[in-house]
Amino acid sequence: MSITSLLQQTTLLPEHYRTLSKDEMEARIIDIKQTLGKKLFIPGHHYQKDEVIQFADATGDSLQLAQVSAANKEAEHIVFCGVHFMAETADMLTSEQQHVYLPDMRAGCSMADMADIYQTEQAWPILQQLFGDTILPLTYVNSTAAIKAFTGRHGGACVTSSNAKDMVKWAFTQKQRILFLPDQHLGRNTAYDLGVPLENMAVWNPHTNTLETTQAPENIQVILWKGHCSVHEGFTVQHTAMIRQTYPQMRIIVHPECSREVVAAADDAGSTKYIIDTITNAPSGSSWAIGTEMNLVHRIIKQHPDKHIISLNENFCPCLTMNRIDLPHLLWSLESIVEGQPMNRIQVDSNTAIEARLSLERMLARA
Protein backbone atom coordinates (compact mmCIF):
# COMPACT_ATOMS: atom_id res chain seq x y z
CA MET A 1 0.00 0.00 0.00
CA SER A 2 1.18 3.50 -0.77
CA ILE A 3 1.34 5.74 2.26
CA THR A 4 2.13 9.36 1.57
CA SER A 5 3.53 11.07 4.64
CA LEU A 6 3.59 14.82 5.00
CA LEU A 7 5.90 17.10 6.98
CA GLN A 8 2.91 19.33 7.51
CA GLN A 9 -0.41 18.99 5.79
CA THR A 10 -3.28 21.38 5.58
CA THR A 11 -5.82 22.12 2.89
CA LEU A 12 -6.91 25.46 4.31
CA LEU A 13 -5.21 28.41 2.70
CA PRO A 14 -4.44 31.09 5.32
CA GLU A 15 -6.98 33.86 4.97
CA HIS A 16 -4.49 36.67 4.38
CA TYR A 17 -3.50 35.18 1.01
CA ARG A 18 -7.03 35.82 -0.21
CA THR A 19 -6.62 39.56 0.37
CA LEU A 20 -3.50 39.94 -1.79
CA SER A 21 -3.77 41.37 -5.27
CA LYS A 22 -2.53 39.48 -8.32
CA ASP A 23 0.33 41.95 -8.69
CA GLU A 24 1.38 41.50 -5.04
CA MET A 25 1.41 37.73 -5.34
CA GLU A 26 3.33 37.76 -8.60
CA ALA A 27 5.92 40.16 -7.17
CA ARG A 28 6.44 37.95 -4.09
CA ILE A 29 6.82 34.82 -6.22
CA ILE A 30 9.40 36.55 -8.42
CA ASP A 31 11.35 37.60 -5.31
CA ILE A 32 11.31 34.08 -3.86
CA LYS A 33 12.44 32.55 -7.13
CA GLN A 34 15.36 34.96 -7.19
CA THR A 35 16.18 34.28 -3.52
CA LEU A 36 16.14 30.49 -3.80
CA GLY A 37 17.73 30.44 -7.23
CA LYS A 38 18.70 27.00 -8.47
CA LYS A 39 17.61 25.38 -5.20
CA LEU A 40 14.01 25.81 -6.35
CA PHE A 41 12.43 24.07 -9.33
CA ILE A 42 8.79 24.54 -10.38
CA PRO A 43 7.45 22.02 -12.90
CA GLY A 44 4.05 22.90 -14.38
CA HIS A 45 1.70 20.48 -16.10
CA HIS A 46 0.16 21.50 -19.44
CA TYR A 47 -3.30 21.70 -17.85
CA GLN A 48 -2.34 24.32 -15.28
CA LYS A 49 -3.72 27.86 -15.41
CA ASP A 50 -1.66 30.53 -17.18
CA GLU A 51 -1.28 32.40 -13.88
CA VAL A 52 0.71 29.40 -12.60
CA ILE A 53 2.41 28.34 -15.85
CA GLN A 54 4.09 31.75 -16.12
CA PHE A 55 6.31 30.76 -13.16
CA ALA A 56 7.04 27.20 -14.29
CA ASP A 57 10.68 26.33 -14.95
CA ALA A 58 9.49 23.47 -17.18
CA THR A 59 6.15 22.54 -18.71
CA GLY A 60 5.06 19.15 -19.96
CA ASP A 61 3.21 15.93 -19.17
CA SER A 62 3.42 14.25 -15.78
CA LEU A 63 6.17 11.68 -16.40
CA GLN A 64 8.26 14.11 -18.42
CA LEU A 65 8.14 16.63 -15.57
CA ALA A 66 9.08 13.99 -12.99
CA GLN A 67 12.08 12.99 -15.11
CA VAL A 68 13.17 16.60 -15.62
CA SER A 69 12.87 17.17 -11.86
CA ALA A 70 15.05 14.13 -11.15
CA ALA A 71 17.65 15.28 -13.66
CA ASN A 72 17.91 18.70 -12.01
CA LYS A 73 20.37 17.75 -9.25
CA GLU A 74 20.76 21.36 -8.07
CA ALA A 75 17.11 21.61 -7.11
CA GLU A 76 16.45 20.91 -3.43
CA HIS A 77 12.82 22.06 -3.45
CA ILE A 78 10.49 20.87 -6.21
CA VAL A 79 7.10 22.58 -6.07
CA PHE A 80 5.03 20.44 -8.42
CA CYS A 81 2.19 22.32 -10.08
CA GLY A 82 0.02 19.40 -11.09
CA VAL A 83 -1.93 16.76 -9.18
CA HIS A 84 -1.13 14.28 -6.44
CA PHE A 85 -0.08 11.24 -8.49
CA MET A 86 2.34 13.42 -10.50
CA ALA A 87 4.05 14.64 -7.35
CA GLU A 88 4.26 11.03 -6.14
CA THR A 89 6.05 10.00 -9.33
CA ALA A 90 8.44 12.94 -8.98
CA ASP A 91 9.19 11.91 -5.39
CA MET A 92 9.93 8.33 -6.46
CA LEU A 93 12.34 9.41 -9.21
CA THR A 94 14.17 12.17 -7.36
CA SER A 95 16.94 11.73 -4.78
CA GLU A 96 16.60 11.80 -1.00
CA GLN A 97 18.15 15.28 -1.01
CA GLN A 98 15.30 16.59 -3.16
CA HIS A 99 11.94 17.32 -1.57
CA VAL A 100 8.70 17.43 -3.57
CA TYR A 101 5.73 19.59 -2.54
CA LEU A 102 2.17 19.94 -3.82
CA PRO A 103 0.82 23.48 -3.31
CA ASP A 104 -2.71 22.22 -2.58
CA MET A 105 -3.34 18.72 -1.24
CA ARG A 106 -6.84 18.80 -2.71
CA ALA A 107 -5.33 18.66 -6.21
CA GLY A 108 -6.09 15.04 -6.92
CA CYS A 109 -7.15 13.11 -10.02
CA SER A 110 -10.57 11.51 -10.26
CA MET A 111 -9.29 8.96 -12.79
CA ALA A 112 -6.40 7.87 -10.59
CA ASP A 113 -8.79 7.57 -7.65
CA MET A 114 -11.03 5.20 -9.65
CA ALA A 115 -8.40 2.46 -9.35
CA ASP A 116 -8.26 1.94 -5.61
CA ILE A 117 -5.49 -0.40 -4.42
CA TYR A 118 -7.88 -2.33 -2.16
CA GLN A 119 -10.30 -2.90 -5.04
CA THR A 120 -7.41 -3.92 -7.29
CA GLU A 121 -6.10 -6.46 -4.81
CA GLN A 122 -9.63 -7.84 -4.46
CA ALA A 123 -10.01 -8.11 -8.23
CA TRP A 124 -6.70 -9.85 -8.93
CA PRO A 125 -7.46 -13.29 -7.37
CA ILE A 126 -10.90 -13.33 -9.01
CA LEU A 127 -9.35 -12.62 -12.39
CA GLN A 128 -6.67 -15.24 -11.74
CA GLN A 129 -9.40 -17.76 -11.02
CA LEU A 130 -11.18 -16.84 -14.27
CA PHE A 131 -8.13 -16.70 -16.54
CA GLY A 132 -5.27 -18.41 -14.69
CA ASP A 133 -1.76 -17.01 -14.83
CA THR A 134 -2.32 -15.39 -18.23
CA ILE A 135 -2.71 -11.72 -17.30
CA LEU A 136 -0.12 -8.94 -17.25
CA PRO A 137 -1.19 -5.69 -15.55
CA LEU A 138 -0.44 -2.36 -17.20
CA THR A 139 -1.17 0.97 -15.59
CA TYR A 140 -1.43 4.40 -17.11
CA VAL A 141 1.00 6.80 -15.39
CA ASN A 142 -2.15 8.65 -14.31
CA SER A 143 -2.43 6.31 -11.33
CA THR A 144 -1.43 6.23 -7.69
CA ALA A 145 1.95 5.02 -6.49
CA ALA A 146 0.15 2.03 -4.97
CA ILE A 147 -1.24 0.95 -8.35
CA LYS A 148 2.15 1.43 -9.98
CA ALA A 149 3.61 -0.78 -7.22
CA PHE A 150 0.91 -3.41 -7.89
CA THR A 151 1.89 -3.62 -11.55
CA GLY A 152 5.56 -3.70 -10.65
CA ARG A 153 4.96 -6.54 -8.20
CA HIS A 154 3.14 -8.61 -10.81
CA GLY A 155 5.60 -8.18 -13.66
CA GLY A 156 3.75 -5.36 -15.37
CA ALA A 157 4.64 -1.83 -16.36
CA CYS A 158 3.44 1.73 -16.73
CA VAL A 159 2.32 3.31 -19.98
CA THR A 160 1.91 6.89 -21.17
CA SER A 161 -0.54 8.09 -23.80
CA SER A 162 2.48 8.47 -26.12
CA ASN A 163 3.90 4.96 -25.71
CA ALA A 164 0.73 2.97 -24.91
CA LYS A 165 0.81 1.08 -28.22
CA ASP A 166 4.42 -0.02 -27.76
CA MET A 167 3.76 -1.10 -24.18
CA VAL A 168 0.62 -3.07 -25.05
CA LYS A 169 2.54 -4.81 -27.85
CA TRP A 170 5.25 -5.70 -25.33
CA ALA A 171 2.69 -6.92 -22.78
CA PHE A 172 1.25 -9.37 -25.30
CA THR A 173 4.73 -10.89 -25.74
CA GLN A 174 4.73 -11.60 -22.00
CA LYS A 175 1.21 -12.89 -21.36
CA GLN A 176 -1.91 -13.86 -23.27
CA ARG A 177 -4.03 -11.11 -21.70
CA ILE A 178 -3.62 -7.66 -20.18
CA LEU A 179 -5.38 -5.85 -17.36
CA PHE A 180 -5.36 -2.14 -18.18
CA LEU A 181 -5.73 0.37 -15.33
CA PRO A 182 -7.25 2.86 -14.60
CA ASP A 183 -8.56 4.42 -17.84
CA GLN A 184 -10.76 2.13 -19.89
CA HIS A 185 -10.83 4.52 -22.86
CA LEU A 186 -7.06 4.74 -23.38
CA GLY A 187 -6.88 0.96 -23.00
CA ARG A 188 -9.72 0.34 -25.44
CA ASN A 189 -8.48 2.82 -28.05
CA THR A 190 -4.93 1.48 -27.88
CA ALA A 191 -5.92 -2.18 -28.12
CA TYR A 192 -8.37 -1.47 -30.94
CA ASP A 193 -5.69 0.34 -32.93
CA LEU A 194 -3.49 -2.72 -32.52
CA GLY A 195 -6.17 -4.98 -33.98
CA VAL A 196 -7.91 -6.34 -30.89
CA PRO A 197 -11.66 -6.59 -31.66
CA LEU A 198 -13.95 -4.69 -29.31
CA GLU A 199 -15.82 -7.89 -28.50
CA ASN A 200 -12.55 -9.35 -27.16
CA MET A 201 -12.38 -6.65 -24.50
CA ALA A 202 -14.19 -6.85 -21.17
CA VAL A 203 -14.70 -4.23 -18.47
CA TRP A 204 -13.92 -5.01 -14.85
CA ASN A 205 -16.38 -3.31 -12.52
CA PRO A 206 -14.63 -2.79 -9.16
CA HIS A 207 -17.88 -1.86 -7.43
CA THR A 208 -19.56 -5.17 -8.18
CA ASN A 209 -16.41 -7.30 -8.60
CA THR A 210 -17.76 -8.56 -11.91
CA LEU A 211 -16.53 -8.78 -15.49
CA GLU A 212 -18.87 -6.97 -17.87
CA THR A 213 -18.92 -9.01 -21.09
CA THR A 214 -21.10 -11.36 -23.09
CA GLN A 215 -18.07 -13.30 -24.32
CA ALA A 216 -16.67 -16.57 -23.02
CA PRO A 217 -13.52 -16.05 -20.90
CA GLU A 218 -11.27 -17.73 -23.48
CA ASN A 219 -12.13 -14.99 -26.01
CA ILE A 220 -11.11 -12.11 -23.76
CA GLN A 221 -7.75 -10.50 -24.55
CA VAL A 222 -8.03 -7.15 -22.76
CA ILE A 223 -9.57 -6.48 -19.34
CA LEU A 224 -10.33 -2.79 -18.95
CA TRP A 225 -10.67 -1.24 -15.51
CA LYS A 226 -13.90 0.73 -15.23
CA GLY A 227 -12.30 4.16 -14.85
CA HIS A 228 -12.18 7.29 -16.96
CA CYS A 229 -11.06 10.91 -17.15
CA SER A 230 -14.01 13.14 -16.29
CA VAL A 231 -12.62 15.86 -18.58
CA HIS A 232 -12.17 13.73 -21.70
CA GLU A 233 -15.34 11.71 -21.19
CA GLY A 234 -17.17 15.04 -21.50
CA PHE A 235 -16.58 15.09 -25.26
CA THR A 236 -19.27 13.29 -27.25
CA VAL A 237 -20.11 12.28 -30.82
CA GLN A 238 -22.75 15.01 -30.73
CA HIS A 239 -19.92 17.52 -30.37
CA THR A 240 -18.09 16.06 -33.36
CA ALA A 241 -21.30 16.08 -35.41
CA MET A 242 -21.85 19.75 -34.57
CA ILE A 243 -18.33 20.63 -35.73
CA ARG A 244 -18.87 18.73 -39.00
CA GLN A 245 -22.09 20.64 -39.59
CA THR A 246 -20.80 24.09 -38.56
CA TYR A 247 -17.22 23.91 -39.85
CA PRO A 248 -17.07 21.23 -42.60
CA GLN A 249 -13.37 21.88 -43.34
CA MET A 250 -12.25 21.85 -39.71
CA ARG A 251 -10.10 18.96 -38.52
CA ILE A 252 -10.90 17.35 -35.17
CA ILE A 253 -8.06 16.13 -32.96
CA VAL A 254 -8.71 14.51 -29.59
CA HIS A 255 -6.90 12.85 -26.71
CA PRO A 256 -7.12 9.02 -26.52
CA GLU A 257 -8.71 9.33 -23.06
CA CYS A 258 -11.87 10.22 -25.01
CA SER A 259 -14.37 7.43 -25.66
CA ARG A 260 -13.90 5.01 -28.56
CA GLU A 261 -16.86 6.60 -30.38
CA VAL A 262 -15.36 10.09 -30.17
CA VAL A 263 -11.91 8.93 -31.27
CA ALA A 264 -13.50 7.11 -34.23
CA ALA A 265 -15.42 10.25 -35.20
CA ALA A 266 -12.31 12.48 -34.98
CA ASP A 267 -9.71 12.97 -37.70
CA ASP A 268 -6.79 12.31 -35.38
CA ALA A 269 -6.00 11.35 -31.80
CA GLY A 270 -2.90 11.44 -29.66
CA SER A 271 -1.21 12.46 -26.45
CA THR A 272 -1.05 16.03 -25.19
CA LYS A 273 2.41 16.39 -26.76
CA TYR A 274 1.11 14.96 -30.02
CA ILE A 275 -1.75 17.46 -30.07
CA ILE A 276 0.59 20.38 -29.33
CA ASP A 277 3.10 19.28 -31.98
CA THR A 278 0.39 18.64 -34.60
CA ILE A 279 -1.11 22.11 -34.18
CA THR A 280 2.35 23.72 -34.11
CA ASN A 281 3.33 22.04 -37.37
CA ALA A 282 0.00 22.64 -39.09
CA PRO A 283 -0.05 25.20 -41.91
CA SER A 284 -1.08 28.77 -41.24
CA GLY A 285 -4.79 29.25 -41.90
CA SER A 286 -5.72 25.68 -40.96
CA SER A 287 -8.66 25.13 -38.63
CA TRP A 288 -8.89 22.76 -35.68
CA ALA A 289 -11.30 21.58 -33.00
CA ILE A 290 -9.39 20.13 -30.04
CA GLY A 291 -10.83 17.62 -27.60
CA THR A 292 -8.74 18.00 -24.48
CA GLU A 293 -8.48 20.09 -21.29
CA MET A 294 -9.65 23.70 -21.62
CA ASN A 295 -6.63 25.51 -20.10
CA LEU A 296 -4.39 23.85 -22.66
CA VAL A 297 -6.77 24.56 -25.53
CA HIS A 298 -6.93 28.24 -24.60
CA ARG A 299 -3.12 28.38 -24.42
CA ILE A 300 -2.79 26.76 -27.85
CA ILE A 301 -5.27 29.28 -29.26
CA LYS A 302 -3.17 32.18 -27.91
CA GLN A 303 0.05 30.68 -29.27
CA HIS A 304 -1.33 30.22 -32.80
CA PRO A 305 -3.26 33.36 -33.83
CA ASP A 306 -2.68 32.42 -37.49
CA LYS A 307 -4.95 29.37 -37.14
CA HIS A 308 -8.65 28.96 -36.39
CA ILE A 309 -8.75 26.83 -33.23
CA ILE A 310 -11.68 26.05 -30.96
CA SER A 311 -12.51 23.52 -28.27
CA LEU A 312 -14.51 20.51 -29.39
CA ASN A 313 -16.89 21.44 -26.56
CA GLU A 314 -16.70 25.17 -25.94
CA ASN A 315 -19.02 24.95 -22.93
CA PHE A 316 -16.78 22.52 -21.10
CA CYS A 317 -14.95 23.30 -17.85
CA PRO A 318 -11.20 22.92 -17.22
CA CYS A 319 -9.96 20.09 -14.98
CA LEU A 320 -11.33 21.17 -11.61
CA THR A 321 -8.76 19.37 -9.45
CA MET A 322 -5.85 20.60 -11.56
CA ASN A 323 -7.23 24.11 -11.18
CA ARG A 324 -6.89 23.94 -7.41
CA ILE A 325 -3.28 25.00 -7.91
CA ASP A 326 -3.53 28.76 -8.22
CA LEU A 327 -1.45 31.85 -7.43
CA PRO A 328 -2.36 32.01 -3.71
CA HIS A 329 -1.50 28.32 -3.13
CA LEU A 330 1.73 28.57 -5.13
CA LEU A 331 2.81 31.62 -3.13
CA TRP A 332 1.84 29.96 0.15
CA SER A 333 3.92 26.90 -0.73
CA LEU A 334 6.94 28.97 -1.70
CA GLU A 335 6.78 31.21 1.38
CA SER A 336 6.51 28.17 3.66
CA ILE A 337 9.78 26.87 2.16
CA VAL A 338 11.53 30.21 2.69
CA GLU A 339 10.28 30.29 6.28
CA GLY A 340 11.70 26.80 6.94
CA GLN A 341 8.29 25.21 7.51
CA PRO A 342 7.43 23.68 4.12
CA MET A 343 3.86 22.55 3.61
CA ASN A 344 2.50 19.47 1.88
CA ARG A 345 5.63 17.50 1.19
CA ILE A 346 4.87 14.39 -0.84
CA GLN A 347 6.78 11.35 0.32
CA VAL A 348 6.04 7.82 -0.91
CA ASP A 349 7.03 5.05 1.50
CA SER A 350 10.13 3.12 0.45
CA ASN A 351 8.49 -0.29 -0.13
CA THR A 352 5.85 1.18 -2.42
CA ALA A 353 8.46 3.28 -4.22
CA ILE A 354 10.71 0.28 -4.91
CA GLU A 355 7.90 -1.73 -6.55
CA ALA A 356 6.46 1.28 -8.37
CA ARG A 357 9.89 2.11 -9.83
CA LEU A 358 10.02 -1.44 -11.23
CA SER A 359 6.88 -0.64 -13.20
CA LEU A 360 8.32 2.65 -14.42
CA GLU A 361 11.70 1.12 -15.25
CA ARG A 362 10.13 -1.62 -17.37
CA MET A 363 8.47 1.09 -19.41
CA LEU A 364 11.54 3.34 -19.65
CA ALA A 365 13.66 0.36 -20.76
CA ARG A 366 11.46 0.17 -23.87
CA ALA A 367 11.30 3.90 -24.54
Image: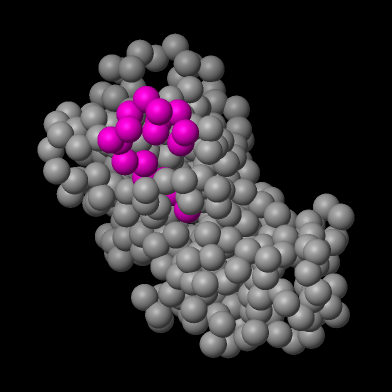
How many labels sit on residues? 0
Residue at horizontal 19 percent and vertical 33 percent from the top = 307
Q: Is residue 145 left or right of residue 125?
A: left
Tell me if residue 142 comes above or below residue 105 in the rendering: below
Residue 32 lies, in percent from the top left, at 29, 35
Which span of residues is magenta-colored?
240-256
Instruction: Between residue 154 and residue 213, name the one nearer to us.
Output: 213
Tell me if residue 250 comes above or below residue 83 in the rendering: above
Q: Is residue 308 left or right of residue 186?
A: left
Q: Would residue 21 be seen by someone viewing this image from the given angle?
A: yes
Tell me if residue 335 comes above or below residue 5 in the rendering: above
Residue at horizontal 79 percent and vertical 85 percent from the top = 132
Residue at horizontal 53 percent and vertical 32 percent from the top = 238
Instruction: Between residue 152 and residue 336, name the one nearer to us.
Output: 152
The quadrant holding residue 246 is top left
Asked whether residue 249 is drawn in magenta, I would say yes
Instruction: Between residue 69 and residue 291, name the one nearer to us.
Output: 291
Figure coloring: one colour
Name the image quarter holding the N terminus.
bottom right
Residue at horizontal 65 percent and vertical 84 percent from the top = 176
Residue 329 lies, in percent from the top left, at 46, 30
Residue 191 lies, in percent from the top left, at 54, 68
Q: Would residue 6 be seen by someone viewing this image from the given angle?
A: no
Asked whether residue 313 is drawn in magenta, I would say no
Q: Is residue 125 left or right of residue 21?
A: right
Instruction: Between residue 364 and residue 146, name the one nearer to us.
Output: 364
Tell me if residue 330 comes above or below residue 342 in the rendering: above
Residue 110 lies, in percent from the top left, at 62, 44
Q: Is residue 354 left or right of residue 253?
A: right
